[in-house]
Amino acid sequence: MPHICILTAAPDYFEDSSPARANYRRLLGDDISFRHWTDPGDLTHFDLVLPLLVWGYQRDCPRWFALLNQLEQQQIKIANPVSVLRWNSDKSYLLALEQADVLVVPTMISAALTVKDLEQAEQKFGTDALVIKPPISGGADGTYRLKTGESLPEDMAGKTMLIQPFQPAIAQEGEYSLFYFDGHFSHAILKRPAKGDFRVQEFLGGSEARIDCPVGVQELAVQARRAAEQMLGVETLLYARVDMLRDPDGHFRLMELELIEPSLFFEHAADGGAMFAGTVQAKLCQDA
């Protein structure tokens, strides 16, 4: 019987992964294994490794990239592939997608963030509110909203950071997430932050609801996914979550393309995640 391993967060990570583990057991069977990504042991005997719960990898980048190198060297059967995981770890991929004509949230990169960088970004984007975040980040780690005149957070000064104009729609309308398995659309949700916040993560008070896709949303999602596949030389991504929002002019813009450890919100899928399970089984048969 094919043996599947899902890589999970470090033992001391703050967020409880047991509900997600239960979901994956329900979909993939009780015999799947779970290994902490920080100390996964020997993975060579698994038929498929999935990094779906490697939460917190951004907190130990050297160890994360060392693991990716190890997986590559040992030719571990992993999906999405190591080349995709490495590329998707750094959110500067947004600039590459923009070069491929994907409409993304406008983004600048500062190699060593200063107040002058923020002033230049305000002028470039024509805004008095910015969002800054590390290029390798997750779970809103190191993410700040800054208005003109507010102090630069000490822990971010001098670090490599992404700078983006704050998008009011995140609080007014929400963030759209679309889910694809082996290139096929599964479901979509709308995530909203808690009142007074702009971060949509559940542990920060965010909420989500299943929705039908507005006009233009799927088109952008497919364009972004296909652009990434072409860039990376991958025929089809096993799984992808595409996050986007509406800009002040009414255009949908890509926020993130989640190809490593996206929450997949199976509770909002009409089939409860059956498409995902079928995709994994098809991958196993293909590689057998």
Image: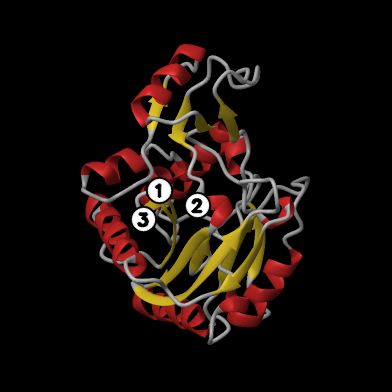
Dot 1: few (<14), some (14–19), or many (≥20) neighbours within 10 Å?
few
Please tell me whether mark 2 sits on a helix, a strand or a loop.
helix
Find out whether the residues at labels 1 and 3 contact each other: C-beta distance under 8 Å.
yes
Which residue is at 69% across, 46% downward? 196
Dividing the picture into quadrants, the one containing residue 206 is: bottom right
Q: Amino acid at mark 1?
A: Pro
The quadrant the N terminus occupies is bottom right
Does residue 261 lie above or below 148 as drawn? below
Residue 192, percent from left and from top: 61, 59
- The residue at the point 62 percent across, 33 percent down is 142
Tell me which amino acid carries mark 3: Gly
Badge 3 local density, few (<14 within 10 Å), some, or many (20+)? few
State which tag comes first along the sequence, 2 or 1.
2
- Real-space CA distance between mark 1 and mark 3, rounded to the nearest whole angstrom: 5 Å
Q: Which residue is mark 3?
A: 250
Q: Which residue is label 2 attached to?
A: 169
Considering depth in this image, is 84 or 219 the residue closer to the camera?
A: 219
Q: Which quadrant is home to the C terminus? A: bottom left
Image mark for residue 248 = 1
Q: Residue at x 40, y 54 (%)?
A: 75
Viewer-side residue, 42 vs 150: 150
